[in-house]
Structures are given as C-alpha cells and as structure tokens.
Image (cartoon, rainbow, N blue to C red):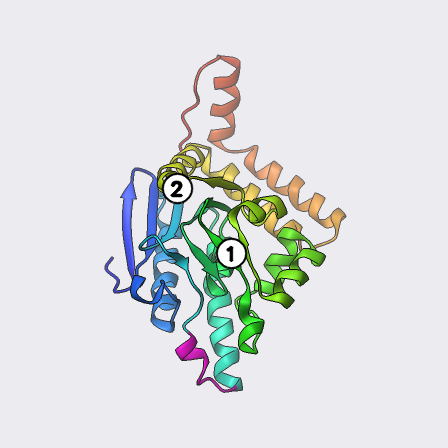
C-alpha cells in the first residue's frame, strides 16, 4: 500500500509506520489523517501483523501537531468535523487489539501528543518534548487530548499541562506517567522495535483481550469492569493458545502461539 505522507515497513510480525512530512515537522493535515486511517485498518485486518511501531520522519519531530494552516480557516462546523475525524482515527489505533508503540523521536505536541497517547505504549528519546499547547492558539485539544491525558497522568497534572500549554521533557514525561520508557535518541528505534517484537511473540488473542479489558474497563463501573474481565477470561480459556501456553509451562519449554 503506497501513501504520500506515510512510510510503511515490515520487520517480521512488526509493522513500522512513519509520518513522513519532515518539512513541516510531520504535522497532521487532513490527507495524512485519512492515510493513517487506511494504514491502521490494514494493520488491524492483517493477522500477520502482531505489533506496530509509529514514529516521525527525521530527528526533530514525532508529530509537531495538527496543521495550523488548516485550523486557522475552520469555522464551527468544519472544526467539529475535523476533531471527530482525528478522534475516529486515534480510536482505531487505541482499539486495534494489537500493541502499538509510539517511538517519540522529537516534538510530540498537540495532535502529536494525542497520537502518542492513543498508542498502547510510548517510548521516548531523551531529547523528546511533549505537550498540549493548543491553549496558546486560543483553542483546545480536539483529538481527545483532554480525555486521554487526564486518564494517563491524573486530573491535576493534566490541567497543569493543558492550561499552561507548556512542554515537558522526556524525563518529566516518564515521571508523570505520560511515557513508559526513555532511551538515548540513537537507540530509540532499536528499543521500540525490540519491545514490539517481544509483544508480537505473545499470544495474540490474550493480548487483544487485555487491551480491551483495560480500555473498556476504564469507562464503566468497577463491578461491570470485573464482569467484562471475567467474560474475556472465559473466552480466552477456550483458545488453542491457552492450551499451548499452559502445556508448555508444565513441560518447561517455550510456547509457540498461533493466534487461535
């Protein structure tokens, strides 16, 4: 599949998607969002893809934000449609049912921070900077940034970042829980691919249900979340991978998961 604004690679069961607009710090415009949607749907349906890494082209930016030239001319209806389009694409990423690793190689601001937060895990280069600076443009996050940020770092810290619009370093992002790991910039892609490969080797059905249990469970009461977990546990208990995993454990050998 060919795209103007994306680069796609495969490394075994790991797909690597690069936002390729380095001349504008990989800003997300409407065509890029549309291409991202198609790529994500393709990864979702491709059983041979078991994990995905998303990063930005160049060494300056993961994604520096949405395209301000588009935002500046939008009226209320277009603005709402623009936000809904981005939310839809990022929801697809969050609920792909496969681990998606954001390899944050530079600025991840506005829509870029929202994209990273939609991923399952975030690995940041030491030089990365993250934030939601929309308030400085007289707007608010539109790709669910207010919602995912508060869920990741808590209400107080989220309001600090959202209202001030300040950037945080990779070290502070790790401290507040915005990213999962920080590595030297030169090692970012190698470490992100290594993590993706490790997760790709896990049983796909169990991985999908863990992601679903966490994502869906956060949005309902605790008793309903427990019921969801028990239901998914029951489903995964019927899989060949469950039998392979438990048998391999008892036989003291490495399991070979088939995804069924």
Q: Is residue 198 left or right of residue 141?
A: left
Give the residue furthest to the top: 251
Q: Where does the magenta region start and end?
A: 68-75
Q: Which residue was labeled with disc 2? A: 188
Location of residue 179 in the rendering, given as x and y in whole percent from the top left corner? 54, 47
Query: What residue appears at the point 68 percent right and 54 percent down from the top-left corner?
Result: 154
Most foreground residue, 65 or 129? 129
Examine the rendered structure and indicate whether residue 84 appears above or below residue 157.
Answer: below
Of the numbered discs 2 and 1, the one sitting upstream in the chain is 1
**Residue 211 highlighted magenta (yes or no):** no
In the rendered image, the vertical position of residue 230 relative to residue 111, given as above or below: above
For the C terminus, give its image quadrant. top left
Left/right placement of residue 33 relative to residue 149 reads left
Rendered view: 254 above or below 240:
above
Picture quadrant of residue 155 = bottom right
Going by the picture, which residue comes out furthest to the left? 2
Q: What count of labels does the image hold?
A: 2
**How far apart are the two marked residues, 2 and 1, measured between alpha carbons?**
16 Å
**Badge number at residue 85:** none
Q: What percent of the width, then of the height, locates residue 29? A: 38, 71
Q: Which residue is mark 1?
A: 130
Which residue is located at x 43 percent, y 63 percent? 64
Rendered residue at 49%/41% (across/down): 182
| Residue located 45% across and 66% down the image | 65
Q: Residues within 10 Å of mark 1 (few under 14, many from 20)?
A: many
């Amino acid at each position: 599949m060919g795209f103007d604004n994306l680069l796609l690679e495969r490394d075994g069961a790991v797909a690597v998607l690069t936002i390729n607009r380095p001349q504008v710090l990989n800003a997300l415009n409407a065509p890029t969002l549309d291409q991202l949607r198609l790529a994500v749907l393709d990864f979702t349906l491709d059983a041979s893809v078991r994990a995905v890494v998303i990063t930005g082209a160049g060494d300056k930016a993961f994604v520096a934000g949405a395209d301000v030239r588009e935002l500046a001319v939008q009226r209320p209806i277009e603005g709402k449609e623009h936000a809904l389009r981005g939310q839809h694409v990022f929801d697809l990423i969050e609920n792909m049912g496969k681990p998606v690793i954001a390899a944050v190689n530079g600025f991840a601001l506005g829509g870029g921070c929202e994209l990273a937060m939609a991923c399952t895990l975030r690995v940041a280069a030491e030089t990365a900077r993250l934030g939601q600076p929309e308030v400085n443009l007289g707007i608010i996050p539109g790709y669910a940034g207010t919602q995912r940020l508060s869920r990741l770092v808590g209400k107080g810290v989220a309001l600090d970042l959202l209202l001030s619009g300040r950037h945080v370093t990779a070290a502070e992002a790790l401290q507040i829980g915005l990213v999962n790991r920080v590595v030297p910039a030169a090692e970012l892609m190698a470490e992100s691919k290594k993590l993706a490969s490790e997760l790709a080797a896990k049983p796909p059905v169990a991985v999908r249900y863990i992601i679903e249990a966490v994502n869906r469970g956060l949005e309902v009461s605790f008793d309903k979340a427990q019921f969801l977990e028990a239901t998914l546990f029951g489903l995964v208990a019927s899989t060949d991978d469950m039998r392979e995993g438990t048998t391999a454990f008892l036989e003291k050998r490495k399991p070979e998961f088939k995804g069924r």
